[in-house]
Image (cartoon, helix red, strand yellow):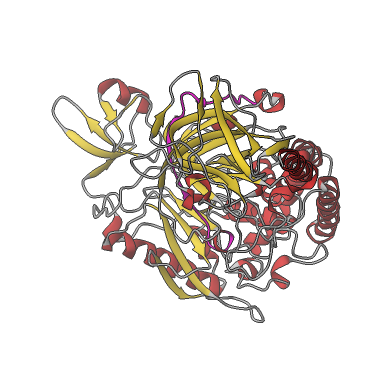
Amino acid sequence: MRLVNYLLLLLVWASLNAADYPDMYLRGNFNGWAADDNMRLSRDGDTYSITVDRLDGEFKVGTADWKYNYGSNGSLTVTGDCSFEAIPDGSNIRAEGLNGITLSYRLALDEHGDIQPSTIHISTGGANPPAPSGMSGTLPVLYINVYVPGSTVYDNEIISRNLAHKNYFDGEYWLDLNGCEWLAQEGAASIGSREEPLPLQIKARGNYTRTAFAKKPFKLKLGSKQKMLGLSKSKHFALLAHADDSFGYMRNFTGFNLGHRIGLPWTPSQQPVEVVINGDYRGLYFLTESIRIESDRVNITELADLCSDPELISGGYIVELDNYDEENQISMDEKSGVSGYRLDRLRVTWDTPEEYSALQKKFITDQFTTINNLTGSRDPALWQYLDLDDAVRYYIVEEIISHIEAYHGSTYLYRDRGEGEKWHFSPLWDCGNAFNGPVDGYFYDHSLYGCTWIPSFRVQSAFNTCLRETWKWFMSTCYAGIEDDIISYAAHIAEAAVADRRRWKDAQRPDASSTADVVNNSDINKARDRVLSRLRDKTAWLTQKWGSYAASEPEPARDATPAAPLPDYAKPSAIDEFAGDRSAATDMVTYYNLQGVKVAHPEKGRLYIRHTPSSVTKIIF
């Protein structure tokens, strides 16, 4: 009988060894207690193992059918280097702060030939764990952890495909340059570390891009200002997913590159980065400078929320021509000076400041009602309100990239404070429908959207004269080099694009209507060549329309149309206009900006507080 039992045991063991080993998974609060291929343990004979970034809270190991669940009772706190063994008894292991751990165990057979889990072995030596599977390893990596408040358990709502709100989550981050030499040459450096992460807040951003894709864009607010990947120093950045960019993630890159080249007042910069959130590889993202009033971004006077001071309400403002109805906006029927084009609502959403007083809302309403009416009547007085040169430069960029959604949404304008100021088309943002228009026609003649105002601008002689002169200067002196930039950029992100496709190719839409819709950019060279071909064809067609150019055309002089005066309710009162010797004036008195900071060299046209031994006066210098 013993021999029979022994032979039976051998037969069971041989069968198990041949084909019947179960798939084993690590589960825990970090992945919703669900089996996931990313948490499958690798097997070598009867021994299973997995190395993970971090474990927090309760976790288990078991098969897909939950036949085997085991662990050790009680709570385990791990600090420093350690290794330990836990005897399975069917319960969970609870751990706090397991970093860089390797978990292994082996299957055994009992005397009846039934599979039984044996010893669990967990070890951590303090070394960094391997990068999450799937990354290309060719770009910097931004690690972000978000925890359930008051715990060290991951809050995975932030990476849920059904994330339905834009509320901030508290978290931590560190940025690993990952040996990326080309970015180091641009001034990039690692920030923080796994051992010493830095605080941040993160939330979902966007409208369509947030709700239509599992790979979502995010907004970051760092705990302190940082020069992230060599970008301007700030607390505020966007992580753009570009999940719908079918041109190799090059729509924004090309539009922003042109904006820098043509000399718009400020255009965001961005850098590619691979992102890991809560230990989960999220793919290729683009760390982008957010639109902010800051000295290195939109450099205008900052205006407080809910300001009712008539001396201050003329600026500075950043507003968006929007395609969504929002609470924080004004709306009116769009006026047009030409027929045959689809008209839309003119929605002006306030970006900065975020909350308007009644007086601020009146100022914005009056300004854009006047601009809208002048546009519809083809009145050249329009250029008393809009900066003509920036309007032309902004349009040239949008036309070169055939951006059919331009002027419909994500179109920003800003205005600084005071008399003599105008509204500027800037900064560029969200070229998400670039290259969808024709290469042999104007984009607004083929757009599916209401192209707010631009057809009406095109029938104004002042606009067209400035357009032709600016076009010749730009193409002869500033455009060359963009193809080299695109080729280099494509080479930098090529492997990460493959990794991103691998990560998201089977991702289901939030509404579960289909899998993916995330575009396939794995052949980055093919996408690059499509972009280059479109740029060559479009600029050749525009040269026929706007004129050929010599080797070096001069930059046209800025438009000298004077700005419209401020309305009486927004004019400063008791403010002196200083007309004397400014160099002598700065020796006699002290000047402060409206935030109370001493200014050594006041600039013409700006509003300051002038302090003398006998008086304090507001002054336009």
What residue lies at 79% left-to-right and 41% top-to-bottom?
14
On whether residue 551 falls in the magenta region, the answer is no
344 or 566: which is nearer to us?
Answer: 344
295 or 337: which is nearer to us?
Answer: 295
Q: Which residue reaches farthest left?
A: 614
Q: In which quarter of the image is the C terminus?
A: top left
What residue lies at 69% left-to-right and 47% top-to-bottom?
22
In the figure, is residue 303 to the left or right of 250? left
* Relative image position of residue 511 (x, y in whole percent): 58, 68
In the rendered image, the vertical position of residue 387 relative to residue 201, given as above or below: below
* Relative image position of residue 132 (x, y in whole percent): 64, 36
364 or 533: which is nearer to us?
Answer: 533
- Image quadrant where residue 448 sits: bottom right
Q: What stretch is highlighted in magenta?
A: 186-209
- Image quadrant where residue 105 sits: top right
262 or 98: which is nearer to us?
Answer: 98
* Relative image position of residue 295 (x, y in whole percent): 45, 35
Q: In which quarter of the image is the N terminus?
A: top right
Q: Which residue reaches farthest front?
A: 1
Q: Can residue 272 be seen in this view?
A: no
In the rendered image, the vertical position of residue 140 relative to residue 457, given as above or below: above
Dominant secondary structure, magenta: loop
Q: Can residue 247 be seen in this view?
A: yes
Count numbered badges in the picture: 0
